[in-house]
Amino acid sequence: MVFVTVFGALLSVMALLISWWTLKLARDSLAIARKTVEHARMDWAQEKWFDLYLKAGRAYNGLEHYQAQYQGSSPLPQSPEQVRDLNQLMRLFYEAHTMALVFPKNAATEALFLSTRFKNAADVLSKEKTKALLDALELLRQKALVDRSVLEAGS
């Protein structure tokens, strides 16, 4: 009878240890899952900033190209080609604005909007607008930077 009592007590202690170990594994798994979810969220956010940076970069390149082609010409489009090129440029700005509008208000998107607000046709040829857009692009680039830990992990 004593043997059964001791054996029952031993089984209870073993069950308690197994339960404790299982609880520890569950807590560790939960901590890993939380870190994984947070890392995935940060990666997603960085990717979205990079997408916006890339879109704004295309608009900046389009503006520089347009200015190189038409600098010194009349601010009002004079030829069908210039009208087409201006429309293509405005489409690039529209695409960047459409993407930026879904981001929370912040200095980078506000700078993008302000730098691409053209009051008249002469603004499109303005070097000040180009500089302002480049400054906005730098703010977006800062938001889009890849976390250093990601780059150093492969080293």
Image: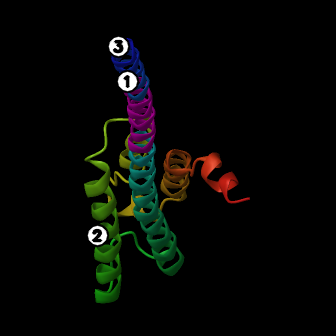
Identity of the residue drawn at 44% across and 23% down: 17
Q: Nearer the viewer, mark 1 or mark 2?
A: 1
Which element type, helix, strand or loop, lies under badge 3?
Answer: helix
Identity of the residue drawn at 43% across and 34% down: 25
- The amino acid type found where label 1 is placed reads Leu
Based on the picture, tell me whether residue 108 belongs to the magenta stretch: no
Based on the picture, tell me whether residue 20 belongs to the magenta stretch: yes
- Residue 5, labelled with which disc? 3
- The amino acid type found where label 2 is placed reads Arg
Question: Where 13 falls versus 43 (above or below)?
Answer: above
- Counting from the top left corner in percent of width and height, residue 29 is at 41, 38
Q: Which residue is mark 2?
A: 91
CA neighbours of label 3 inside 10 A, class few (<14), some (14 to 19), many (20+): few
In primary-sequence order, the first of circles 2 and 3 is 3
- Residue 11, labelled with which disc? 1
Along the horizontal axis of the image, is 27 left or right of 152? left
Looking at this view, is 4 or 92 the one in front?
A: 4
In the rendered structure, which segment of residues is drawn in magenta? 19-37
Residue placed farthest to the right in the image? 155
Question: Where 80 falls versus 63 (above or below)?
Answer: below
Q: CA distance from mark 2 to mark 3?
A: 83 Å
In primary-sequence order, the first of circles 1 and 2 is 1
Q: Is residue 72 at all visible to an observer of this figure?
A: no
Instruction: Work out which quarter of the rendered image holds the N terminus and state it.
Output: top left
